[in-house]
């Protein structure tokens, strides 16, 4: 096993920097003004930027340096939240690190204890069982009934949250046996959306659109496709082809705004063909 290099001086320096930024007298006015809610969007944004850096590891020069920097930005978010909690005498960064260390040891008895697992599948099952125990303990502490959907954060991206909710429901048997009824459900939702469109019922259209998207995520789950990753790839493909369309028209001295949809579709088709050749 490769032992990790000590990072205590670097962590201590980062914690000191954050404390100085939050100092009520000599700190940074912007940092002083923040709270958990105002920083949360930045935390989410930094996590996405880490994911984006990982997605481009194979096609960008200096990609690992970029990933290092993005991980630092994400770490700063953890330090920021921990500093604000320390100011409230709630917890500090050391407590955060200790809590996750305790959790990892508890969830890996095959590494840190005497238990053994045959393979990764068995370990995953044990991991989920341990998490279920922890969710049950939390529900009991909060004095409420436990649900199979406990722990699915409401702030997750909608596609990811839909996937997690469906996976949780499937664990207790609430699931279609194969893709055929899922496809039928998608057709049903399209028909219901079409009916509300014909009726001009805007609130009902929004509701039916949500049902349709939820059903499409269900199909992705049955096909073992990550819907968030699939949509990101679709977004990237659209952006790539549209930029190609723009560049091609620009080379001809043309402006897309001057075209009708039929001519733009022709240019789009050319961009697709060019990409695939």
Image: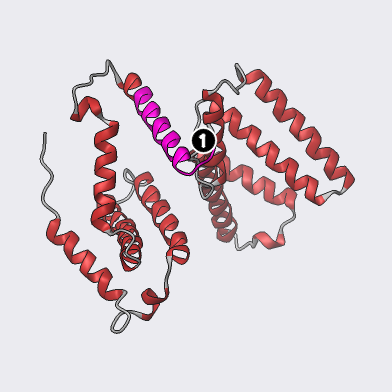
The image quadrant of residue 125 is: top left
Q: Tell whether 277 sits left or right of 212.
A: left
Query: What type of secondary structure mainly makes up the magenta span?
Result: helix
Query: How many numbered marks does the figure carry?
Result: 1
The image quadrant of residue 223 is: top right
Residue 228 rendering spot, x and y as whole percentages: 51, 41
Label 1 Cα crowd, 10 Å radius (few <14 / some 14-19 / many 20+):
some
Residue 212 rendering spot, x and y as whole percentages: 69, 37
The foreground one among 224 and 61 is: 224
Q: Tell whether 200 sits left or right of 33.
A: right
The foreground one among 134 and 6 is: 134
Circle 1 sits in a helix, a strand or a loop, which is it? helix
Residue 41 rendering spot, x and y as whole percentages: 47, 60
Q: Quadrant of the image for the N terminus? A: top left
Which stretch did the figure color magenta? 124-144
Residue 180 rendering spot, x and y as whole percentages: 66, 18
Which residue shows up at 54% across the image and 57% down it? 247
The residue to which callout 1 is attached is 164
């Amino acid at each position: 096993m490769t032992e990790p290099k000590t990072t205590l001086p670097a962590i201590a320096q980062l914690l000191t920097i954050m404390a100085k930024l939050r100092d009520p007298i000599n700190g940074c006015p912007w940092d002083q003004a923040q709270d958990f809610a105002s920083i949360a969007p930045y935390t989410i944004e930094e996590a996405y930027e880490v994911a984006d850096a990982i997605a481009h590891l194979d096609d960008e020069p200096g990609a690992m340096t970029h990933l290092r920097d993005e991980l630092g930005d994400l770490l700063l978010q953890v330090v920021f939240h921990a500093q604000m909690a320390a100011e409230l005498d709630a917890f500090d960064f050391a407590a955060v690190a200790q809590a996750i260390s305790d959790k990892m040891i508890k969830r890996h008895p095959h590494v840190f204890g005497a238990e053994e697992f045959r393979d990764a599948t068995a370990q995953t099952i044990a991991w989920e069982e341990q998490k279920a125990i922890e969710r049950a303990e939390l529900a009991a502490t909060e004095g409420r009934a436990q649900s199979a959907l406990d722990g699915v954060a409401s702030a997750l991206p909608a596609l990811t949250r839909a996937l997690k909710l469906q996976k949780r429901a499937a664990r207790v048997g609430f699931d279609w046996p194969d893709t055929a009824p899922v496809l039928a459900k998608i057709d049903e939702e399209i028909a219901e959306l079409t009916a509300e469109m014909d009726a001009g019922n805007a609130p009902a259209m929004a509701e039916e659109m949500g049902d349709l998207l939820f059903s499409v995520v269900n199909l992705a789950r049955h096909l073992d496709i990550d819907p968030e990753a699939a949509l990101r790839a679709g977004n990237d493909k659209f952006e790539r082809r549209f930029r190609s369309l723009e560049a091609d028209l620009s080379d001809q001295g043309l402006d897309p705004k001057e075209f009708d949809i039929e001519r733009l579709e022709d240019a789009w088709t050319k961009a697709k063909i060019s990409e695939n050749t």
